[in-house]
Each structure stands twice: as structure tokens, then as C-alpha cells.
Image: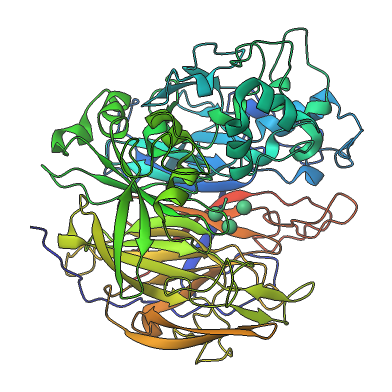
Amino acid sequence: AVTVTVNPIALDFTAVPKSLADVVAVPAGYDVTVLYRLGDPLAAGVSAYANNGTDSNFAQRAGDHHDGMSYFGLAATGTAPSASNSTRGLLVMNHENITESYLHPNGPTGLSAGSVRPTAEVLKEMECHGVSVVEVTRGSAGWSYVQGSSLNRRITPFTPTSFSGPVAGNALLFTAFSPNGTAGRGTINNCANGMMPWMTYCTAEENWAGYFRRDADDNARRSAALGTKSVTAFNRYGLGIRIGNYNWTSAAAPAAGDTRIAKFNATVDASKAANGTGDYRNEPNQYGWIVEIDPFDPNSTPRKRTALGRMNHEGVCPGRMIAGVKPAFYMGDDAQGEYIYKFVSNTAWAAADATAANRLAVGDKYLDAGTLYVARFAADGSGQWLPLVFGQGVLTPTGYPTYAFADQADVLTHCRLAADAVGATRMDRPEWTAVNPATGEMYCTLTNNSSRRPTGANAVDAANPRAYVDTKVTGGSSTGNVNGHVIRLRETNDSTEATGFTWDVYAFGAEAGADAANINLSGLDATNDFSSPDGLWFSEPTNTAGQATPVMWIQTDDGAYTDVTNCMMLAAIPGRVGDGSTKSVTSTVQGASATVQARVGKAPGASLKRFLVGPKGCEITGITSSPDGTSLFVNIQHPGEGGDPQNITSNWPANQTGTAAAGVRPRSATIVIAKADGGIVGI
Ligand code: FEO
Ligand code: CA
Ligand code: CA
Ligand code: CA
């Protein structure tokens, strides 16, 4: 049995107003410092970032588009972990994507179809993706990062990786680089993250599909070589006929035999072996995984954990770890109408593993064997976890007309098709998952869904109950679930092993003035109204009575409310699943109408408050804390997005201190937020 307590405590700050200013704003009594920016040098001897498009060598600099992030405490000296050290640690963070317009002197060249990209531009853009590991220390002047630390590391799309779990060695992973399907190169579009209880970092490969090129006749070539199944699978994963993001594969190889660029062309070369060992027809199957990294060993090889399935992985959050109980890992697949998943290990948790020296071997133990489940939400507030196991139900060669599953490796590589087959609930873009450490309840941001409608193939349901039209947005109107919501579930018997749950919606995003009956269902007001929740994480500070008190942080990635405010972060002390009521909600779009019963959590009121508003054009994504709760690390992603060297639309972070910075290019960056009095952030 699990003890469930929520300690009574209140958020202790004055809500930050919505703002369009080009600065990070936090409550009175808090300070912001800028810690780690795009291009900052990691290795010794690397020059300071010029920030004019001439910089190179991003394998030894901070990448772009800072995203999911975790703090790992280090011992006072040396390279060993210390889970409690709040003055020296490693920040590990994702670099999801790039703002290519600011990475070259006059912006990128050769982006359009038929043009040729310069090789140096392409390699630079590739190296701006991936993951950073950077040592940070807190001194009398606050936090700084340590240039030249032996633990600093960049993982890029070129870093050697290995595959583990049921898909390792399967023909679906065969490439010219790895003819036996056990190795790969790098990771890309790393969105959110998960800190494993044994002190490793998991990074999630999200919008990887867009980087791949497929030429016009690849469907025919692919069908001939690999069967029509391969085309069905590629279509289901958004691997269309296209030149690929940034037209990368138009660039010439850096040297004969160098396939770092060519690997992004998945077009079948009919002159090569049908099984894919001679080209990169299977390279897209090497992406879409959760990748585990040991941040304390810069020479370790990241492991792609195939048992957790392949999708647009947003992130992964472990449930509570309880000795003798099999742990669960919760995941969202961020695309319209995709699913929420959990993986349950075959092995029950042993507390000694939290401090084991061979961290990736502990990962093998918990992440390579288990059951992947997908969620189905019922209108009555119950739900089921449906197992995705080859041979069970319709997951057989003949059980599902759309796709003939061959084995468990096929089910995991194509878990979207398996989830379709078993009848999972199609959600409004599942983004981050987070688990309340006090209750074990799992929260998931459903950021928005412009395809949700009252009726038809994307009809509203109890778990995704809103579709409406918002005409007051930047650049035109927005339709569907415009503002998103945060769903949550409580496992049966509060057990990570459960196959059933109850659920409700913690909060619906909305503008404060929106229709209270059908849109602003959670009664948001000027202090806490938000749109498009995305980043989601629980800190667990200790209150003045010595009680651990979870605070939930919600970060936004919004397009619909940006006519009024830049993206933001809110703090919450949430209640419990089922603390609210059922509301009858009517959706109306273009003459179609439908009414469903929404399950709305208790109105958050003052237990949800806006804590931060970011600079122009940014998304707020990525958050972690020092173990003592006095320093909160937050990532500001793509400030000034949409601008270019001729039209610089943000000068952040150069202007954060109030310094005049006109003409300075914006940079994604990590900030640190601390209370001026040194206290715990938020409470
Ligand atoms: Fe990278 Fe779904 O956000
Ligand atoms: Ca996200
Ligand atoms: Ca998003
Ligand atoms: Ca983003």
C-alpha cells in the first residue's frame, strides 16, 4: 500500500502579469541570471561566441533551442554523483532544433528545392542539435558554468549510439553504417527528457521524421524492396515524400565516404541489397526512441531503449519508485490525435540501484524488458492501459487489416499502428508527462489540436471535450482545441503496475474572458490564464514545517494567445483526481455542434499562478532545480523566432539586465531563478 499525503501549503509570490516585453519577467523578490547560451564555449580554448553567424565548432559549444533539462548533483570534487549537492552539478539539456536564420552571417542559403546547401552550413546546423552536458557551480556571485570541465560533453547527430531492447539487431534497423542493426549515429530533435532514479538522463526524439528526404518514386521503390508494409509504416509516421528539413541532403559530402549528410536521405537505392544494409532506407527507423545517457561518463555510448516504443517521443517521466514494485515510465506522443503510453518494467525496483556505479547497466535492467501500454479513456472517468504485445488480441500477422505485425520488434517500432489496432484514445497532442511525487498521480499536457471538431473523425470526446473558434489570434483565426488542457490520472490502487485508472482534467487552457460555460471551464483569471501547456514538471521543495511539498510547473508553447502575451510558466499546487465535477460542454465549429460531459478538476483559483513571462518569440520549455529548491533552472527556447539578421525581432538575452542591445542577435539560453533572500523558489 502507498501512503498518500498532500501537505497544505500555498504559493507565496505575486502573479506576474501577461506581457509582450522582450525580457524574462519573474515575481518581485526573485532574480534572473543568464547561465548558458547558444554558442557558449564548452571545451577549453574555444573562443567566445561572436554571435554574428561566423562561429563554428558547435560540437564544443552549446547547441541551439534549449529544451528538456535535468540537474545532476556532483560530489564536491571529482566526477561521482551526489544527489543532494546544490552547489556543484551537471546540467544536461536537449537542443531540440535551430533558428537557422541567425546561425549564418546573412541567413542560410540554398533552402529551396533544387538548390544546393553549402556543406559547412549543413554540418553546423546538424551540430547545433543534440544534447549538452555542462558542469555548473554556485559561488558567492551565483551560478556559472565551467568551461573546460572534463565532464562537459556535446552529443550531436554524429555521436555513436547503440540499440538495446527487443528491436536491437532487427532488420528494421539495418543500415550501411550498421549492417546488423545494433548501432547508430546520434540523436535529433530532442524535446523533453526524464531523469532516471539511478542518475541517468533520458532524452526523447520528437519531430525526427521531418529531417528525412524521400524522393518522388520512393513509395514504388520501397514497396518493391520491402513490401507495401514499409510504405504504410512510413506514412503512419509522417515520413512523406519531401526534400527534408533545411534541404540538408542537397549538400555535398564533406569527404568521399563520409555519410553523415547522406544518411538523411531515406530513398531506396534499388541497386543495393533489399534488406537495407547498403543504403539508408531504414535510417528513419533508427529515430523516434527514448535515448539514455550517463552524464557522469563522457565516454559512454548513449543507448536507444527500444522497449519504450517509437513515436514522436515528447519525454519520459518515471512514476514513483517503490521497492518491490515494478516501476512505470509515462510518455506522450506529440502529434494530433496521438496517444499517451506507459512502460512497466518486468523487474521490481530495488532501492540500492539508485546509487549503483554502472548506471547504464541499471538502465538495461529496468528499460529493456517490460510491457508497453497505451491509454484508453472512458467517458465515465475510468480508463484502461492496453498492452502492446505481439500475439495478443489483434497484434498478429492477420489480426489487423491495415498492418500485418511480424513480431514484438515490429510492434514496438510501429507502436502507433499497434495502438490504432487496439483502440486507444486519440488525444489533443500529448506533450510532457509529470508525476506528483506525493500522490503518484500522472499529469500530461495536451497542448492544443487544430483538427479537433464537434463531429466526424476527430470528434470531441470526454477526455478531449472542446472544439471552438478563436478569431483574436496573431495572423488569423484558430480552430479546434485552441488552448489545450492538462489531463491527469490516478492508477488503480495507486500502483505503477495497474492496468486501470481514473482520470479528470486538472485545468483547461483559456483566456480569462472566454465563455465560462464552454471554454474557460477551469475559471482562469488574469493571474493564471494560459494557452498551450507543454513543459510540465514537479519540484519537491520542503516547506517551513519540513514537509516535502510538490509544486507543479507548467510551461507554454503557444501561438493562439501571443497577440496578448509572450509564452510563460505557471506554478501550481494541484489537488487530486476527482476533486471537481462533471460539466456539460458544447462545442460549435462552422455550424457543427456536439455536447459532451467533461470531467473538470476543482477550479485552481490561487493554487495556480503565473510565475514567469518570457521574451519575444520564445517558448518556455525545460526546467529543473537544485536539490535544495533554492535555484530553479529554466530554458528559454528560440527568442526572436521568425526574425533574421536583417530583421532582428528580439535582443534577448543580451538585454536582460537592461543593457541597450539593439542589433544583437537573440540566443536560446538557460536561466537561473533564485529568491533574493535565498529561500525556496515558489513557496
Ligand atoms: Fe518539442 Fe512537442 O514539443
Ligand atoms: Ca514540447
Ligand atoms: Ca509544443
Ligand atoms: Ca519547440
Q: Nearer the viewer, residue 32 or 547?
A: 547
Residue 386 lies left or right of residue 291; in this view the side is left
User: Where residue 239 sits in the image (x, y, percent)?
Assistant: 66, 39
| Number of numbered discs on residues | 0
Tell me, what colour scheme is on the image?
rainbow
* Residue at position x 48%, y 86% in the image: 585
- Quadrant in which the C terminus appears: bottom left
* Residue at position x 88%, y 37% in the image: 113
Q: Nearer the viewer, residue 304 or 209?
A: 209
Seen from this angle, which residue lies furthest left? 1
* Residue at position x 28%, y 31% in the image: 369
User: Where residue 114 sits in the image (x, y, percent)?
Assistant: 92, 33
**Image position of 220 with respect to 674: above or below:** above
**Image position of 593 with respect to 252: above or below:** below
**Image position of 241 with respect to 676: above or below:** above
Location of residue 174 (image quadrant): top right
- Quadrant in which the N terminus appears: bottom left
User: Where residue 255 sits in the image (x, y, percent)?
Assistant: 78, 10
Residue 12 lies left or right of residue 362; in this view the side is right
* Residue at position x 68%, y 86% in the image: 591
